[in-house]
Amino acid sequence: MIGIAELAVSRAPDTLTTLGLGSCVGVALYDAAHRIGGLAHIMLPCAPSACPTEYHAKYADTAIHELLQRLMLLGADLRSLTAKLAGGAHMFASLGKSDYLQIGQKNLLACYELLAEHSIAVVAEETGGTVGRTVVFDCQSGQMLVRTAMPKAEFII
């Protein structure tokens, strides 16, 4: 179970789960050949300078870097990693389209840019909209189950 602003890596047959992805983004990285995966629950696009290590999972830039480091320690081949994303919703839609409140979109853009920098393809996503999500990432199959509460729905990506 991965909390807000946390991350974890594991291998098959484990699953990695995070709850409450609103404007936050769940980033799953996966090495299919070795069945090794990682999941981060990212809150904000970029860390402030001198960000303490214990807060690295909170920010897209430091969380993705940390995921890559931990996946390598487990034996993942970074050249074969793929990504799946969930979340990045516009949770403050009723307050208008103020750029300040577009946290979900900013989080997604930061994730796309960072993954592209590392040549990691986004192979599936369930992002945007105005609903919160829960995800379960399966390190055996590489599938991500995405659940929404309102409206109640399930997607496998």
Image: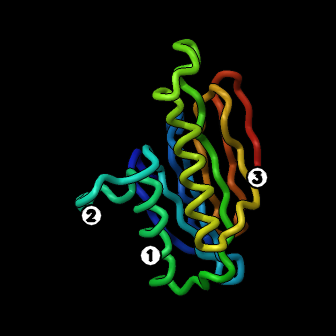
Rendering quarter of residue 7? bottom left
Q: Residue 133: image x %, image y %? A: 60, 36
Badge 2 or badge 1: first in the primary sequence: 2
Q: Which residue appears at 60% of the width and 41% of the height? A: 87
Q: Which residue appears at 65% of the width and 83% of the height? A: 79
For badge 3, the amino acid type reads Ile
Q: How many labels were placed on the picture?
A: 3
Q: Which residue is mark 1?
A: 70
Q: Nearer the viewer, residue 25 or 154?
A: 25
Q: Residue 113: image x %, image y %? A: 59, 59
Whole-number angstrom distance, CA of label 1 to CA of label 3: 23 Å
- Decide: few, some or many residues near mark 1? Use Cα within 10 Å; few <14, some 14-19, many ≥20: some
- Decide: few, some or many residues near mark 3? Use Cα within 10 Å; few <14, some 14-19, many ≥20: some
For numbered disc 3, what is the local secondary structure? loop
Whole-number angstrom distance, CA of label 2 to CA of label 3: 31 Å
- Decide: few, some or many residues near mark 2? Use Cα within 10 Å; few <14, some 14-19, many ≥20: few
Q: Which residue is mark 2?
A: 53
Q: Which numbered dot is residue 157?
A: 3
